[in-house]
Image: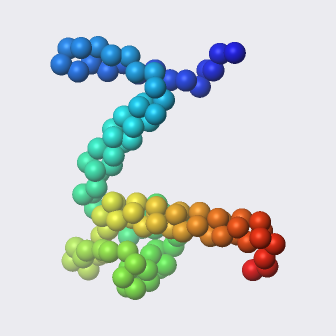
Amino acid sequence: MLNNNLQKIEVIINGTKMIIEDQEKIQSITDIILSDTISEKASVLITSQQAADLLGMSRPTLVKLSDNGKIPFTKNGNRRMYYEKDIRAYQLKREQGAKNIGSLVDLSEDLNLEL
């Protein structure tokens, strides 16, 4: 049976052409490329409304989190500005926390515990 989900990439290094079919290597290369793209965007300043939109929350909630030290910000005059990398980091942290809670719920169900 043919697996249509397999990927191939062509890489040219110093004039030498290689075809990579190993899925783990392809994933590693993809991760490196995406991390470089993310780091290029890391220094981008965004407004509080843009940050709130990225996080799927209201601007007042974002401001409260910032005032409590959960999300760093800088001031530009009287406006709060956020580095996109800080917003993405908070988003990842929040998603990881949700996964951990889900794992705890699964574990409690496996052990027949009530929360």
Q: Position of residue 70 (x, y in %)?
A: 40, 78
Give 19 or 90, whichever is nearer the viewer: 19
Residue 113, by quadrant, is bottom right
Give 90 or 7, whichever is nearer the viewer: 7
Residue drawn at (34%, 65%), measured in percent from left and top? Answer: 86
Residue at the extreme bottom of the image, as rendered: 68
Which quadrant does the C terminus fall into? bottom right
Q: Position of residue 96 (x, y in %)?
A: 52, 63
Residue at the extreme front of the image, as rendered: 111
Q: Position of residue 102 (x, y in %)?
A: 65, 65
Q: Position of residue 72 (x, y in %)?
A: 32, 74
Q: Is residue 35 visible?
A: yes
Residue drawn at (46%, 34%), measured in percent from left and top? Answer: 24
Residue drawn at (46%, 66%), measured in percent from left and top? Answer: 93
Residue 44, by quadrant, is bottom left
Above or below: residue 62 compared with residue 8 = below
Left or right? Give the position of 54 relative to 17: right
Above or below: residue 94 compared with residue 34 = below
Number of labelled discs? Answer: 0
Left or right? Give the position of 41 relative to 60: left
Residue 64, by quadrant, is bottom left
Judging from the image, the colouring scheme is rainbow
Residue at the extreme left of the image, as rendered: 14
Above or below: residue 30 compared with residue 102 = above
